[in-house]
């Protein structure tokens, strides 16, 4: 490839770590039900009312985010040194999970 063609080729924008985390969260599904289906398929369970041990937090830990610093709440998600707004579908899922809409995802003591 000539240098001229290389200059004309669009470069992929490198995403900031916060943008990557948002994409990971949005990739779980576009609704509470889709996220539920994703968690069932992956066999991920969690504890209700525990922002650091819900299914989404456990998924993030499995996905490589530092286990001691993951916290998923309705409005803010923290993972490693990152803090992002929690996407609407994830917020809905967290509310549904905490209100026991998905008992099959609740880890038994």
Image: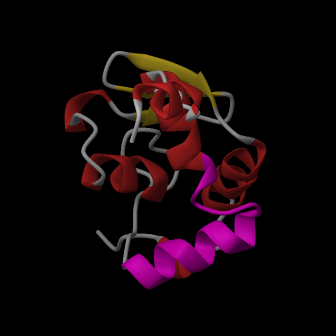
**Residue 12 located left or right of residue 80:** right
Q: Looking at the image, which residue is at 38% across and 39% down? A: 52
Residue 47 coordinates in the image, percent (x, y): 42, 57
For the record, the magenta segment spans 26-42
Q: Is residue 33 above or below residue 87?
A: below
Residue 75 coordinates in the image, percent (x, y): 68, 28
- Residue 73 in which image quadrant: top right
Residue 101: tell me if it is visible.
no
In front here: 52 or 23?
23
Q: Looking at the image, which residue is at 63% across and 50% down? A: 26
- Residue 44 in which image quadrant: bottom left
**Residue 44 located left or right of residue 89:** left
Residue 46 coordinates in the image, percent (x, y): 40, 61
Colouring method of the image:
secondary structure
Q: Looking at the image, which residue is at 48% across and 81% down? A: 40
**Residue 44 located left or right of residue 7:** left
Residue 84 coordinates in the image, percent (x, y): 57, 23
Number of disc labels: 0
Examine the structure image and report whether residue 48 is included in the region drawn in magenta.
no
Q: Is residue 3 above or below residue 103?
A: above
Q: Looking at the image, which residue is at 49% across and 72% down? A: 39
Q: Quadrant of the C terminus?
A: bottom left
- Residue 29 in which image quadrant: bottom right
**Residue 62 located left or right of residue 30:** left
Q: Mostly what secondary structure, the magenta segment?
A: helix
Q: Quadrant of the N terminus?
A: top left
In front here: 20 or 92?
20
Residue 89: tell me if it is visible.
yes
Q: Is residue 73 above or below residue 88?
A: above
């Amino acid at each position: 490839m000539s240098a001229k063609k290389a200059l004309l080729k669009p470069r992929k924008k490198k995403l900031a770590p916060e943008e990557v985390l948002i994409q990971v969260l949005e990739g779980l599904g576009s609704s509470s039900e889709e996220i539920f289906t994703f968690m069932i398929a992956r066999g991920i369970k969690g504890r209700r009312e525990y922002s650091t041990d819900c299914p989404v937090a456990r998924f993030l830990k499995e996905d490589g985010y530092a286990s001691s610093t993951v916290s998923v709440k309705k409005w803010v998600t923290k993972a490693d040194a990152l803090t992002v707004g929690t996407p609407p579908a994830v917020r809905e899922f967290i509310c549904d999970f905490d209100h026991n809409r998905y008992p099959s995802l609740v880890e038994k003591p």
